[in-house]
Image: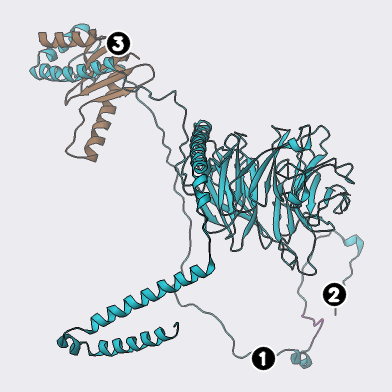
Chain colours: A cyan, B brown
Amino acid sequence: MEIVYVYVKKRSEFGKQCHFSDSKAELNIDIPPNPQLAEQFMERNPVDKGIQCSVSMSEHEANTERFEMETRGVNHIEGGWPKDVNPLELEQTIRFRKKVEKDENYVNTIMQLGSIMEHCIKQNNAIDIYQEYFDDEEVVEVTEEAPSAKTINVFRDPQEIKRSATHLSWHPDGNRKLAVAYSCLNFQRAPEGMSHESYIWDLENPNKPEIVLKPSSPLVTLEYNPKDSHVLLGGCYNGQIACWDTRKGSLVAELSTVEFSHRDPVYGSIWLQSKTGTECFSASTDGQVMWWDIRKLSEPTEVVIMDITRKEQLENALGAISLEFESTLPTKFMVGTEQGVVISCNRKAKTSAEKIVCTFSGHHGPIYALQRNPFYPKNFLTVGDWTARIWSEDSRESSIMWTKYHMAYLTDGAWSPVRPAVFFTTKMDGTLDIWDFVFKQCDPALSLKVCDEALFCLRVQDNGCFIACGSQLGTTTLLEVSNGLYTLQRNEKNTASSIFERETRREKILEVRHREMRLKEKSKAEGKDDELREEVPSINLEELVSKAEEEFFNIIFTELKKKETAAMKPPKQRKMEGDEEVEEQDEEEKEGASEETPA
Amino acid sequence: MAEVEETLKRIQSHKGVIGTMVVNAEGIPIRTTLDNSTTVQYAGLLHQLTMKAKSTVRDIDPQNDLTFLRIRSKKHEIMVAPDKEYLLIVIQNPCE
């Protein structure tokens, strides 16, 4: 509803002066109230209203005028001469000075001050008291902190049916990725529906594996090619060798033929240093070590049988469980066997029998890990049964250093790539031990419980700072060790090498001694042999039985006699030992009963 | 009087000493081996500094007192032996 009032004005009257005049009030519009509209509203009862009962105050701002301040210095050109002395007049100043100098107070003061001053001057001349000492010495970082390690990340097997993580391999460039091989190593106990997949994890993302590898049979080992970071080598549970190219996808790129592969799970696989970067070799518990070329996996290029009797008989062969290869010694390699023997072999030998150079025995069980010391390749570490042992190639009879027998089985071990005296071991009770034998020889420098289940494998990153360990339930834990464990200490190389040499020498001396003793015994035994032949000890079974019976009866009789003498005690003692008497009588009855039965 | 002379001469003759001066509390140089304007400058500034140092020492421990003030700078060392009325100032170049 618009309220509009229209008026009309002539154009000629525009701009003319206004004349105002009174007019009566006119009603233009009358809008009566509409009671129906009231129904759209409701009376509000009660109504809240805030009121304040206080003195009403007002707020004012005031600003004073700025007071300007300035800092100035005063430069004196002339001292504060007393009023009667005119500073410009030389005579007056001289006179004043002379007067002061005659003052006794002045003399005393100057004498006293002079002596103090002289002392300091002489001090200055004697030595430079602000000399900088130890300027040339470089800051030596003394790591006072105790060795420690902390868990950074945990990668869990996303599968429902958990498998153990059996092998780990770090990505060769930048170490940002970790390849983990999963399989179930319990003989024929792999549950139905267990996945064969293995994963490559990106360290930043522990929730989902980055790449999935799908072999036809679960992988026991997995290795990155150190020359080509896209290529991976896997050893399967059924004995085949598989090769992946991560650029091509998760399915196997190359697979060896079943007929020519191993007959048992492939426990060790290592890439070789070759110009083509495609050669590798593998070992398995069927007793064979095979060399392959990736481009042609249909059959191995070479096969060596681990028979230490050197007769090339597969039946006598020892099952290989770990492989070792050092690129600085390209023709030699070592194999750790299930029987606890380390076999050192030469690849370039002319005849197959000469391939096996020597053996080192000392472990009671399978050797799960075998690695040469990256700084001193003559010494190598083996991990098996309940100990870890360090060997020297020169000493073949026994290891030069070994740890004590632990409560749990040791499953894997590795040297630190940065420090020659540090190595790591994992155990079946889920602990990771870090050993530093320039620091402590009898115990690990640090022992960490990583998880509740057994730890199966361990891999140290190239910078020595990160360690990945895989457990029985497929959980891979990434740990970071403290600074002291991966920075090379002063003189550590020398200390470690001197320790190795000393121990090797000790073993050699012992070896010589043993040999002498054995020779002595041999000669003694040969001398006695003639005598012994006459007395043929006829081990007759019946004689032994009767002998045993005799002895038994003798013992019984002597015991009975003892009881009788005890029973013959004076009556006083007997009354006091009332109960004992009854017991004795019971025992006598028992003795009597037992006496009857054997007879 | 002669001892004073002797003392001041001895001080001046020490190795590395550039200048010696005796100033009174009003800033008037009584005895100096340097020129007047330098002396007056030293006197005015060092007097204030000595007062400040003295008051600092006494604020920390009222029973303590300032005995000597040494200012080592890049070029030389200024040593001030204060007294109630006079100041003995020596500028030395410490041999290094």
Chain of the residue that carries numbered disc 2 in the rendered image: A
Identify residue for label 3. Answer: B16
Distance from Cα at disc 2 to Cα at disc 3: 109 Å
Badge 3: few (under 14), some or many (20 or more) residues near its Cα, within 10 Å? some
Amino acid type at image mark 2: Tyr
Gap in angstroms between the C-alphas marked 1 and 2 = 36 Å
Say which of A554 and A11 sits in front.
A554
Residue under label 2, please give it: A5
Q: Residue furthest left?
A: A104
Q: Residue B80: name its quadrant.
A: top left
Q: Earlier in the sequence, mark 1 or mark 2?
A: 2
Residue A43's disc number: 1
- Please state if A266 lies on the left or on the right of B18 as rendered: right
Q: Position of residue A306 (x, y in %)?
A: 73, 45
**Label 3 is placed on what type of residue?**
Gly
Q: How many badges with numbers are in the image?
A: 3
Region rendered in magenta = A24-31
Residue A144 vs B88, above or below: the answer is below
Q: Is residue A218 magenta?
A: no
User: Dot 1, how many residues are within 10 Å of its Cα: few (below 14), some (14-19), or many (20+)?
Assistant: few
Q: Nearer the viewer, mark 2 or mark 3?
A: 3
